[in-house]
Image: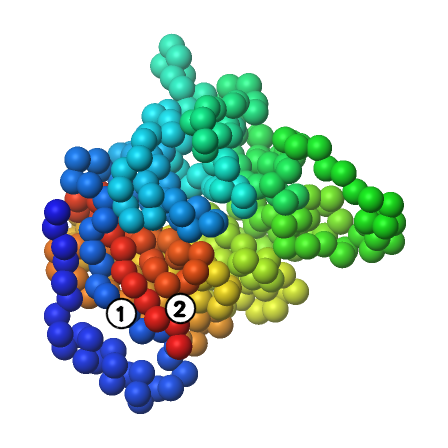
Amino acid sequence: MKIGFRKLPFFLCLIWSQTLFPQTKIQVISPPQQISPDSVRLIQPVYSPDGRWIAAAGEQYRGIALLDSSGRFVRWLTRLEGAGFRFQWSKDAQKLLCRVFKTENRRRKSSIAIISFDMSSIKLLTDWDKNLGLPGWINRGKSVYFLHHNELQILEVEKTVFNEEEEWLRYLLPGNFSPDELLVYVSNDQMILSDYRKTYHLNIIYADQHLINPTLSPDSDWVIFEVLGLGLKIAHRSGKPIINLGNYHSPSWSPSGKWLVCYKSQDDGLRTTTSELYAIFSDGKQIIPLTKTQKIQEQLPNWSPDGNFIICSDNLTQHIFRMELKMN
């Protein structure tokens, strides 16, 4: 098992910067260390909401593997094509939501699927189709949403029961929603923030630009997204001015929603030459380098539910690495 260590001067600079700038609230305790076995090649690791498990995509996003929190390989949850791309855990850590592919007669079709964590069984929620977008959980995990031919679709997977008071509040205050009721998606190059009752809308349009990968903060007050070729941006659901973060990729929110971890890479025109992790405060005013490694290309990071660890995949070896943080 290979372990990458950063050079001592980087640690000294980090400590010095925290002394000089007391607003800095993140300290790296240990550098990235490989935790997944050499025998399995994995990318895009994601902690379960209870922190007990890690799910990670197979090579080229084929399949989803299950690891325990220490990185020990447990089993494959599925080996279906495409399942590993931007899958989502349910909040109770019992299911995973994903989009899967199959090819018949040289035609590629997709379906929205739920994987049961305990039995590793898979349930297809839709027919096989050519125009299905990535799914997401909504309504406290009782429903899922996705785009079909660029039109929003919401499927109830578990019956939602409201008491009389809740029903009255929903009627009286149609804009009064919890974070679990909000969703964000991109359709026809505009980003739409809405609630699953469709009583609230915020549209963000970048003329002649392609918007991808919108992600809501834990409290659903902020949405981070990427403009292809222009980098990351953050918008507030109130319509405040958009914050430009720069050329970073694959952001993951901290549990508090105050920080983001993402990566920035460089290439020589043919291949990636370097890739490092950075922590960015949600207002974009603080950017902290978390790694400076020569033999690891950290990408696709994910924050642990307790905020103490960040996991990522190495672009070179396709192994999972973990680093420890201290939030001051």
Q: Which residue is mark 2?
A: 280
Q: Which residue is mark 1?
A: 29
- Residue 134 image point, x, y percent: 50, 37
Three-letter amino acid code at disc 1?
A: Ile
8 vs 207, nearest the viewer: 8
Quadrant of residue 319 within the rendered picture: top left
Q: Residues within 10 Å of mark 1 (few under 14, many from 20)?
A: few
- Residue 159 image point, x, y percent: 71, 33
Name the residue rendered at 47%, 24% in the picture: 122
Q: Is residue 10 above or below residue 231?
A: below
Using the rendered image of the protein, determine whether residue 43 is visible from the camera's viewpoint.
yes
Badge nearest the viewer, 2 or 1: 1
- Residue 1 image point, x, y percent: 12, 47
Colouring chosen for the image of the structure: rainbow
What element does badge 2 sit on?
A: strand
Name the residue rendered at 54%, 58% in the picture: 218
Quadrant in the picture for the C terminus: bottom left
